[in-house]
Image (cartoon, rainbow, N blue to C red):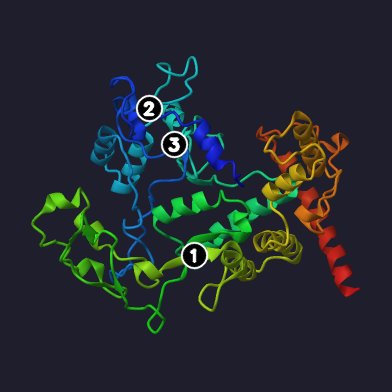
Amino acid sequence: DTDCRWGIISECVDDRRPAERGRKGGPDPDPEVAGKGYRRLYKSRYDSISTYIYQGVSSEDGQMNNRILNMYNDIPVPIDEDKYRQLREAGIDPLLSQHIAHIFVRDPLVIFDGAVEEVDDDTQTEHFESIQSTNWQSVRWKPPPPRTGPNDPHIGWRTEFRSMEIQLTDFENAAFTTFITLITRVILTFDLNLYIPLSRVDANMQRAHGRNAAVNGKFFFRRHMAPLEKGDDGFDEQYTSMFSTVNGKKSTLPTVFSGDDLSALNLTSTDSDVSSWEGVSEKRRVAPNASGGTEENSYEEMTMAEIMTGKGDYFPGLIPLVYAYLDHIQCDSVTMDRMTTYLDFIEKRATGQLQTPATWVRNFIRNHEEYKFDSIVTDSIAYDLMVACKEIGEGKRGAPELLGDVVIKPILASDAYQTKLDSTRVVSNDHIRSLLQRYAARKTKFDETIAVEFQI
């Protein structure tokens, strides 16, 4: 009884040994296995992230500038100590070193013939990717691949958002993909802060699996996303780190306020029993919460409708923020119409006006003439379900309960683009000029047509 595939896939590829799961028994330590097969691993290799890696920057006057330190990384992060030490000695910052060392607590799952000893680690990244590509986390940080020639495409640093569920139609997939892309632009352009403790992120991942969680569930989300200014509710409030009390012992650490200059703080604890902190650094114990009030009040439980459309007078909602961004960049009318269609669709999913695919599938099975309400999906029911999904995706079957008034145009084999996409460089400058002149002429004709339409 689940609305997501994430947990099922996570269990399917969970190759941890009993000792790595924290259980007794299992095989003896194996020196050929990462951590000898006995390092405690708290998650499957297909799971949510265990650490934030962006520390942000401080403003010139030493303020936090709406950034975090390390206090939201509040869950265990097992690492390969040797890899961490090697990265730190090479000058890599602590959080990125921790992230990479965390990936290397696993063994590779896939190794290709001819890509082991034959790989030159000075110029190729196959060995790293064999680990990286089999750690399926909800977000993936991807370094650029090496370029082997001057004409190779330039691929920069990337971040993959990997938790989206596949939808039945190209329209749905395009809507959610576009929405995520726009949210990244909103965060960067408006300098927003959406951090919450990773323990709450994990709680959200679990809650998302519940039946109809998209409508009825509640999820932890930040109340204030923008930097607080003097006079705002919550400005200059005292921050209390979640690490201020460890093992029942309270530290005597300096009080931290939202307006404090962090560089001027005395970060030395007077607690003599250092061992009681179990490796929690001084800086981490006093790390203040990102702007938005005390730690307990910086985030709260919200429904998906509230997250998307807003709550009260303090949380604007993600969809209104996307509209604000589109207005900020002076989005053209044609693109805005398409974006409005996508955003209206997402809002209706969040508010329950439209069903999620999980609800649609569940209703289809429950209404099938062969289903006996015994949790058994027969071959016939499964076949009919697959046919229905295929027909909806191809535009042959309407599904207003899923898509509202959106009509999926039929996908026909005759419409397929048969020409192979070619990336061979055009050598002739004359040919390039000819192509550009043809495009410029077509653009001019298009502009004239639009101008006539506006006059009409």
Marks 2 and 1, the one that precedes in the sequence: 2
Marks 3 and 1, the one that precedes in the sequence: 3
Label 3 close to label 2 by CB (< 8 Å)? no
Q: Can you identify the residue that label 2 sits on?
A: 17
Height in image: 324 above or below 50? below
Q: Amino acid at mark 2?
A: Arg
Q: Residue at x 87, y 63 (%)?
A: 449
Height in image: 350 above or below 395? below
Q: Circle 3: is it few (<14), some (14-19), or many (20+) Cα within 10 Å?
A: many
Marks 3 and 2, the one that precedes in the sequence: 2
Residue 173, given in percent of the width and then of the height, sits at 68, 48
Q: Residue at x 82, y 49 (%)?
A: 408
Q: Amino acid at mark 1?
A: Glu
Q: Residue at x 38, y 26 (%)?
A: 121
Q: Can you identify the residue that label 1 sits on?
A: 301
The answer to whether one can see residue 154 in this image is no
Quadrant showing the N terminus: top right
Q: Residue at x 37, y 63 (%)?
A: 67
Q: Nearer the viewer, residue 81 or 152?
A: 81
Residue 279, given in percent of the width and then of the height, sits at 20, 48
**Mark 1 secondary-structure assignment:** strand
Q: Nearer the viewer, residue 382 or 167?
A: 382
Q: Quadrant of residue 330?
A: bottom right
Q: Can you identify the residue that label 3 sits on?
A: 44
Residue 360, given in percent of the width and then of the height, sits at 73, 48
Alpha-carbon distance for marks 3 and 2?
11 Å
Quadrant showing the C terminus: bottom right
Q: Nearer the viewer, mark 3 or mark 2?
A: 2
Alpha-carbon distance for marks 2 and 1?
35 Å
Q: Residue furthest left?
A: 272
Residue 384, given in percent of the width and then of the height, sits at 80, 35
